[in-house]
Amino acid sequence: MTRSYPVALGGRAYDVVVGPGLIDRAGERIAPLLRNKRTAIVTDSNVGEHHGERLSVSLERAGVAVDVITVPAGEESKSFEGLADLSDRLLALRLDRGDVIVAFGGGVVGDLAGFAAAIYKRGIDFIQVPTSLLAQVDSSVGGKTAIDTPRGKNLIGAFHQPRLVLADLDVLCTLPAREMACGYAEVIKYAMLGDADFFAWLEAHSAAVLDRDIDALAHAVGRSVEMKAEIVAEDETEQGRRALLNLGHTFGHALEAETGYGETLKHGEAVAAGCGLAFRFSAALGLCDPADAARVERALKAAGLPAGMADVPGHPFSADRLIHHMGQDKKAEGGALTFILARRIGEAFTVKGVDPDTLRRFLIAQGATP
Ligand code: GLY
């Protein structure tokens, strides 16, 4: 059931391995990649609680020396302070360029440790061992690393590809249901943007995926990773097609900003609501059949995810405030609003320079306040 998905980036190519039991066998996969047989595992307290020392034990069994750095769990670690603290602890360990950082955790740990690896002594190799569904299908693959600033999320960062990604499906068994649903939002996003057959498969198998059926997970995670690997290999630094991975994100980020980037609306939920809105906006602009937008909404709701603004706590939101947040988005070029919209399920495309008045009318029609 274990399968490797190559990310074809020439001299920086790497594999994303998807399957059960990978943490306990991580040493044998990681050791051959190491020059110095020395690693620093960066993790957080939650991961330690659920997975204990299994990764260290596996590495040590393969003859790899291990130091473990535990950072506080939560988005606050993805900050300049968190980065300074982690860098200092790596320096205190005298980690050098031939050594490797292993990011063992969810998206926060992966983004923080990956960015630290990108700049530590001008760059050191790192490996991702993602422990959330969201990190397995999205953030651990493709080399985007970043921290947040008070002005916004992921604004300071670097493209730094990992040497290997090990996505152990067993770790998903201890993931809270809400976190599973958040990861599922990114899974179904791949289907919506580029694979109608995968979308139909997910319509039939969402319960199995969310119940952690291992075969269903292997297909859902595997197909997501395969699609991301293919897009990243074609457009590593997001000059074109990679932007399609941001389907649902312009609307989603605005809703996250309005709800305070916290427990009220988690990132995956914001992406789900954003995808629902992106399809409805596409339908409102006459780009896509309203029946596709309705089908997207049903699929999101079947997974317990929000499918539009009315499903988000805090509704109704102010149209002007939402548009203001959209203008702050990294993807907004020179203030022009960029959206990923859809012609149908499985076919997304980028639209630049969306007219703010048209957008405003759409948001108000969706229940936002004028
Ligand atoms: N999460 C979107 C990307 O990696 O491009």
Image (tube, rainbow, N blue to C red):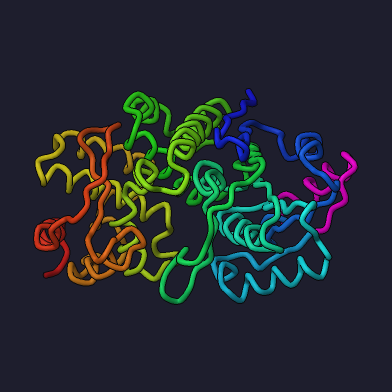
Relative to 147, residue 5 above or below: above
Q: Residue at x 71, y 34 (%)?
A: 21
Of 184 and 120, which appears nearest the observer?
Answer: 120
Residue 202 % position (x, y): 39, 30
Residue 209 % position (x, y): 49, 34
The answer to whether 265 appears left or right of 321 in the picture is right
Q: Residue at x 39, y 25 (%)?
A: 201
The quadrant holding residue 335 is bottom left
- For residue 62: magenta? yes
Residue 342 appears in the picture as rendered: yes
Of 351 and 261, which appears nearest the observer?
Answer: 351
Look at the image and give the residue range highlighted in magenta. 49-67
Location of the C terminus by quadrant is bottom left
Residue 209 appears in the picture as rendered: no
Q: Residue at x 48, y 29 (%)?
A: 223
Location of the N terminus by quadrant is top right
Residue 310 % position (x, y): 23, 57
Residue 30 % position (x, y): 76, 39
Relative to 214, residue 358 above or below: below
